Image: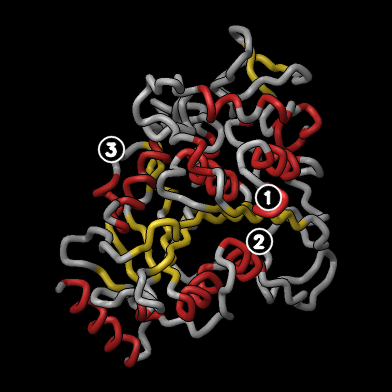
Amino acid sequence: MALIIGLLAAGTAQGMGLATPIRFRDGAAPRLNITRGGVVTAGCSHAGDFAHQTHITWSSLVDGSCVFSGQPYHCAVTKFPGDQLVDATNSSSVPNCDGCPDGKTLIYDHCKNHPQYVDVGMLPDYPRRACGQNPIKIQDCIDDVANLFDDRVYLFRPTHDRCYLKGAVANVQALYGQLLTNPDEQVKFVNDQPFPHTLPTNSTPYFNHSDPAGFDGPGECLRWVYPGLTWAGEYKDANVVEFNQSYYMDDDGVGINTKGFLYVPDVCKPGRNGPTNDGCKMVVITNGCGDFGGGDDKDWAKYGETNGIVVLKPCVGGYVDAERFPQAHEVQRGLLDVYGQLSSDYVMQKAPHMKFVGKVIKAVTGW
């Protein structure tokens, strides 16, 4: 009832020229009718790393991913035979290293800046074995990789990306190639578009150009992971929902924002069951947040409106306890923990950011 009242109030506000998100009386995220197998993740740069990370860690909940410039799972803290090491100090952004000798750690961003160091044959070992599979011995760890067998993945690296050098995203493709049943049919890798480091939308120009290139990144992603999708529609301010993320925090010092957002299409509102009466889909775009509607938010929402896809945006950028996490430099900048700066088990379900996003997905889906 609170959601329905909120929707009516927001509709009235929109009629007055306002764009006020719905807020619930208790502040929690609403439970919606999301179909099993219909949840995917998406993101660019650190959010792309995290989208890929969430897909593998929570593969019982997530069935696909769109990674715009991302590095391979657990790669940031994995020592490969060809890696160069540096002294481990408080100024290092890699406080944890799997395989480094005491007092040493990895060069920051080694998987992005030195993809040639990465032994792609080692990449599947961690998701397959870190939890002590056969039997699983560590709880709240990583879901069974068998959940990934039939998933679909969209990968994107623009030709002028100076943050993720050539080979970095190809290594993500190589990892999925060892985890999916038929990667040639399940993975689409676009690496020929002359953009800088970005998630391009229709209005994004090519590198060194000013005119829009007309490349629809969100649409390209969604049409791959959801075959048969129709085109984007109208964005509606009244369908933006703000919720209180404090319900899903176990620790208020790890950079989680106090608010998160949902875009709930008309056909996915309470009492509705999706465009074909079998539930709605959902794309999860975890990132740093101000309010909903900036960046590419509306581009995802426009596809959601016509195709019954809820857009869930869990948000980071909150307070970080620097005394406890002196090396969490990127998290303090409002980024997601894709470097092991909050914990050595940063990709596992019990890690601060991974646990949080899993809780939010479960709250919205009711799974």
Dot 3 amino acid type: Asp
Q: Which residue is mark 1?
A: 69
- Judging depth in this view, the residue of 220 and 133 nearest the camera is 133
**Numbered disc total:** 3
**Quarter where residue 269 is shown:** bottom left
Which residue is the extreme one toward the bottom? 15
Contact between labelled residues 2 and 1, with CB atoms less than 8 Å apart: yes
Q: Earlier in the sequence, mark 1 or mark 2?
A: 1
Residue at the location (51% across, 68% down)?
Answer: 297
Q: Earlier in the sequence, mark 3 or mark 1?
A: 1
Q: Secondary structure at mark 3?
A: loop
The Cα–Cα distance between marks 3 and 1, rounded to whole angstroms, is: 30 Å
- Judging depth in this view, the residue of 331 and 79 nearest the camera is 79
Residue at the location (50% across, 22% down)?
Answer: 130
Q: Which residue is mark 2?
A: 199
* Image-based side of 150 in relation to 14, left or right: right
Q: Secondary structure at mark 2?
A: loop
Residue at the location (78% across, 62% down)?
Answer: 195
Dot 1 amino acid type: Ser
- Across and down, in percent, residue 129 comes to 52, 22
Which residue is the extreme one toward the front? 181
Query: How busy is the neighbourhood of tag 3: few (under 14 within 10 Å), some, or many (20 plus)?
Result: few
Which residue is the extreme one toward the top? 102
- The nearer-to-camera label among 3 and 1 is 1
Residue at the location (78% across, 19% down)?
Answer: 82
- Across and down, in percent, residue 91 comes to 59, 25
The Cα–Cα distance between marks 1 and 2, rounded to whole angstroms, is: 8 Å
Location of the N terminus (image quadrant): bottom left
